[in-house]
Image (cartoon, coloured by chain):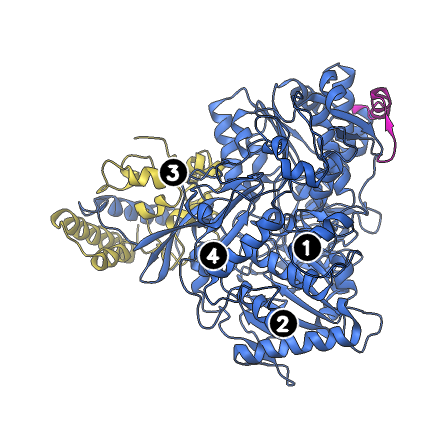
């Protein structure tokens, strides 16, 4: 039916009029409850940690509503969280264990057969090639109990540190920043500081799309308090910048110079806080300490005019940002991947902390240097349980002799069971993954859970063959690019089908109750882990081999909070029965069942660790009681944070004659990561049904590109073909592609850079030098492509 | 001039809505099933949406409406058309209160007039507190 605009409006108006006639609902509408019960939980998606209630009717999840008592979202949800229940009922759900046959197709098998097969193969590979021949690659979307269990199985059971997770790809630089500056991972403050702040600095974060409910809080705060200044520092002028008073545009990877320049302006104008610096910070290059003059002299080279030439950020904007940052009274910074996914990610984090330390904008209401987590349980599940190759529970290094011995004792395993040597970080792990016939690849097997590395790794061309040739076991709920390379696929339960704890960005752990049963024979990860442990002779180490997932979860959680009882991350007061009752979860440190949780760390009277005798004894801490602020995790034992002298360094790749553009990638509000869930919800899939290339009108004109034209974007590593969207969001010379699209032609991670930060080992997803070529006129690629067939092959492999 | 189909569509939608309205007003005990049925009958998107994002057409076809939304809290927070109005298969013109409940659970449970739709008092698309 062809519809003109006039007809369209008339039809719409008629429909609306008709509907308005029928707006009276039955008078007993309030009494009519459309669900049998509401079950408390947390949102499945980003790291905000929104509290939800899942509506269940006749054993089926039929609705989700926000939890108005939650301290994170106050009842608000974004479209992903609101419609998450629909994901569970998509016909593509994996329901039965499957083993790939010689003909290349999967065959349904019993759980016993699948688990026996995996356990036998793992034992065979470990016996033949050593304990590190089988790796675990987890996710910031697994439950805490699941990550903890796999971590314990590998490190305490196999004696192998080949344990990694996708938070390495998103949060590792934030961990590195917090640990190097403050001596301990995770933020000082909380989201509650947002409403107390006078200036909000959003940097390297498209908050409105990637953390929409946090953005709503910022927006509401600005609306109620127009004097609050909002500064956005981003290469793209995103939706987030709509509420900004000041935009600092920068070329990707150059913002270190902007941060140093802001520090220079602050010091030049005497806006710094001398007392705070003197009492609570030291100047260091990581080796030696210096006086403040050394720092002032160091940043003096970053004049706004010089930095403008380097970054394209207007000098005036830098000056204004410095003034507002320093003089607001309470400045709160938030960032995500724009700072973390960089070869200088740790340094970028350090420099943001620097600004807070020199102005005293930390450890006081409304002021904080706050890293927003990308995933719902990267903090709680992976960082805090230490489910990375170099860590143990409590975010402490495996190389730390004292802590390793302590964990061995807590786990009741012989001394020296845990390897003191860290395993391989994610990119190195995948680089060393391969088949038995390849002597250069020492890792021969891998179990992945709740992640899709065959689409999400950068520079995919380098890693796909290894995944295909190795013995790959995949736990997931849908067919993905990774299941296309798997040998065994184990159908997993969704969060609301198993329950468990998520820990969000603000140190808050929230428990989700099991709401419904999983479909078919799908099982919770914790059951799968325990079954594998049993088959590999480690049932005593993982004694939560229960069919009831909430019983198993409680046992694992109790084990975890026991190990970390005397750390600064203590959740000893967050017992399972308490978490079930708490409407908003609990923020660590939470050392006892009477403790309400901690809003602000390092402040006496607010942070319980000042009086935690077990902690002070175990870690040999002497904490004075008369300090207003004391960074007690300072490695030098002086209670000070580090203001780092970090030299300027740009990205691994900058535009050249051959590759004249910057490419940056990111998410859009409706789509989550590789789109395996969100692309299966019709209302969500309709928005952004395909990837696309954002290009500035000046660049489009230069290349004779009109809207919708198909563009090939190529880096040294690979290429993608995407339709052009011509927008002024970015400065000329900067391209943007969202990375959710599963279609092989539009999987942008073939193009992304896998160069890693030396400290955090996090890859520089955010910046690649690329060239573009117009391939054709517009094509309809709005196909909402998803991999439906578990037997479909990965193209070209 | 409009086609016969156009006038027929308008008439059909209006009559259906009137019929439903009468049912709703006269019945104190409308079953959930019959409520669902009537909602479905009022809810057909005038054109095939294909795989397009709603904004692709509505930013041009209903620009005033679109701008009103864009300037609203929902617009700033990117609560887009399909969140409230659904997709092709579950399209609704008048957003059910149960959809609003997703983000406004407290307001939903405190609604002084639950027999009315939220939009009876809160302006559609601009979402001012009260009309």
Residues at marks 3 and 2 on the same chain: no
Q: Which residue is mark 4?
A: A499
Q: Is residue B45 left or right of residue B9?
A: right
Label 2 sits on a secondary structure element that is helix
Percent across and percent down for residue A432 are: 79, 65
What stretch of residues is rendered in magenta? Answer: A286-304
Residue at mark 1: A409
Residue B118 placed where, x, y %? 30, 40
Instruction: Single out the mark in the foreground, 3 or 4.
Output: 4
Instruction: Kindly report the distance in space between the C-alpha atoms of the residues bearing marks 3 and 1.
Output: 61 Å
Decide: is A634 above or below A461.
above
Tell me how far mark 3 sits from mark 4, CA to CA.
37 Å
Dot 1 and dot 2 residues touching (CB under 8 Å):
no
Count of all numbered marks drawn on residues in the image: 4
The kind of secondary structure element at disc 4 is loop
Q: CA distance from mark 2 to mark 4?
A: 28 Å
Name the mark nearer the viewer: 2 or 4. 4
Q: Could you give the CA–CA distance between mark 3 and mark 2, rounded to whole angstroms?
A: 44 Å
Of circles 3 and 2, the one toward us is 2
């Amino acid at each position: 039916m062809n519809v003109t605009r006039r007809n369209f409006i008339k039809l719409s108006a008629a429909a609306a009029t008709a509907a308005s006639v029928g707006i009276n609902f039955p008078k007993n509408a309030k009494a009519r409850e459309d669900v049998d019960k509401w079950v408390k939980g947390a949102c499945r998606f980003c790291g905000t940690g929104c509290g939800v209630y899942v509506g269940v009717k006749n054993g089926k999840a039929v609705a989700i509503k926000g939890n108005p008592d939650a301290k994170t979202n106050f009842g608000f949800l974004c479209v992903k969280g609101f419609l998450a229940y629909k994901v569970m009922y998509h016909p593509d759900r994996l329901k039965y264990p499957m083993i790939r046959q010689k003909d290349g197709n999967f065959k349904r098998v019993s759980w016993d057969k699948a688990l026996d097969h995996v356990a036998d193969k793992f034992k065979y590979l470990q016996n033949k090639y050593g304990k590190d021949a089988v790796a675990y690659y987890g996710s910031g979307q697994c439950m805490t109990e699941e990550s903890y269990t796999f971590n314990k199985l590998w490190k305490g059971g196999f004696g192998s540190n080949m344990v990694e997770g996708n938070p390495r790809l998103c949060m590792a630089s934030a961990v590195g920043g917090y640990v190097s500056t403050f001596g301990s991972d995770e933020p000082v403050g909380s989201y509650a500081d947002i409403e107390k702040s006078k200036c909000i600095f959003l940097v390297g974060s498209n908050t409105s799309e990637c953390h929409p409910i946090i953005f709503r809080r910022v927006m509401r705060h600005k609306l109620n308090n127009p004097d609050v200044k909002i500064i956005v520092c981003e290469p793209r002028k995103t939706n987030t910048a709509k509420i900004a008073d000041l935009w600092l545009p920068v070329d990707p990877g150059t913002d270190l110079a902007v941060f140093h320049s802001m520090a220079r302006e602050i010091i030049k104008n005497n806006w710094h806080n001398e007392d705070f610096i003197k009492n609570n910070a030291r100047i260091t290059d990581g080796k030696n300490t210096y006086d403040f003059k050394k720092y002032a002299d160091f940043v003096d080279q970053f004049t706004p005019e010089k930095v403008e030439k380097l970054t394209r950020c207007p000098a005036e904007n830098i000056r204004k940002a410095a003034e507002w940052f320093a003089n607001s009274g309470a400045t709160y910074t938030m960032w995500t991947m724009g700072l973390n996914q960089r070869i200088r990610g740790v340094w970028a984090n350090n420099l943001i902390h620097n600004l807070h330390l020199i102005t005293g904008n930390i450890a006081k209401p409304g002021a904080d240097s706050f890293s927003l987590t990308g995933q719902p349980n990267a903090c709680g599940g992976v960082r805090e349980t230490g489910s990375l190759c170099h860590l143990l529970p409590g975010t402490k290094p495996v190389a730390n002799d004292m802590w390793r011995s302590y964990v061995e004792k807590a786990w009741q395993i012989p001394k020296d069971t845990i390897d003191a040597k860290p395993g391989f970080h994610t990119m190195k792990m995948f680089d060393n993954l391969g088949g038995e016939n390849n002597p250069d690849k020492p890792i021969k097997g891998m179990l992945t859970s709740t992640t899709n590395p065959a689409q999400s790794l950068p520079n995919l061309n380098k890693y796909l063959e290894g995944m295909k040739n190795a013995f790959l076991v995949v736990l997931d709920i849908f067919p993905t690019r990774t299941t296309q390379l798997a040998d065994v696929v184990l159908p997993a339960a969704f969060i609301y089908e198993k329950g468990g704890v998520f820990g969000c960005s603000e140190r808050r752990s929230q428990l989700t109750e099991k709401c419904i049963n999983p479909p078919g024979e799908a099982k919770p990860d914790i059951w799968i882990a325990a079954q594998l442990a049993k088959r590999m002779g480690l049932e005593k180490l993982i004694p939560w081999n229960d069919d009831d997932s909430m019983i198993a979860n409680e046992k694992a959680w109790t084990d975890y909070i026991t190990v970390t009882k005397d750390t600064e991350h203590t959740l000893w007061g967050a017992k399972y029965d308490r978490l079930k009752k708490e409407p908003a979860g609990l923020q660590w440190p939470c050392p006892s069942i009477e403790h309400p949780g901690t809003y602000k760390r390092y402040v006496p009277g607010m942070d319980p660790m000042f009086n935690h005798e077990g902690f002070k004894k175990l870690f040999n801490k002497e904490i004075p009681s008369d300090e207003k602020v004391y960074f007690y995790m300072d490695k030098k034992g002086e209670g000070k944070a580090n203001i780092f002298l970090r030299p300027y360094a740009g990205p691994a790749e900058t535009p050249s004659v051959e590759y004249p553009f910057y490419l940056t990638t990111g998410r859009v509000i409706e789509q989550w990561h590789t789109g395996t869930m969100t692309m299966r919800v019709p209302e969500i899939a309709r928005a952004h049904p395909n990837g696309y290339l954002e290009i500035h009108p000046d660049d489009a004109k230069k290349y004779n590109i009109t809207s919708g034209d198909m563009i090939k974007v190529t880096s040294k590593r690979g290429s993608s073909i995407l339709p052009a969207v011509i927008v002024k969001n970015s400065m000329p010379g900067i391209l943007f592609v969202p990375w959710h699209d599963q279609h092989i032609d539009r999987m942008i991670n073939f193009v992304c850079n896998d160069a890693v930060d030396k400290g955090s080992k996090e890859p520089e997803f955010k910046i690649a030098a690329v060239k573009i070529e117009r391939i054709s006129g517009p094509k309809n690629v709005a196909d909402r492509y998803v991999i439906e067939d578990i037997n479909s092959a990965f193209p070209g492999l | 001039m409009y086609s016969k189909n156009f006038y027929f569509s308008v008439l059909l939608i209006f009559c259906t809505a009137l019929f439903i309205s009468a049912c709703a007003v006269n019945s104190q005990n409308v079953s959930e099933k019959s409520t669902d049925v009537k909602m479905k009958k009022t809810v057909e998107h005038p054109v095939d949406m294909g795989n397009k994002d709603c904004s692709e057409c509505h930013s041009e076809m209903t620009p005033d409406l679109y701008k009103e939304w864009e300037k609203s809290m929902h617009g700033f927070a990117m609560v887009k058309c399909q969140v409230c109005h659904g997709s092709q298969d579950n399209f609704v013109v008048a957003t059910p209160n149960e959809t609003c409940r997703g983000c406004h659970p407290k307001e939903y449970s405190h609604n002084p007039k639950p027999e009315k739709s939220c939009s009876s008092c809160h302006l559609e698309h601009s979402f001012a507190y009260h009309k």
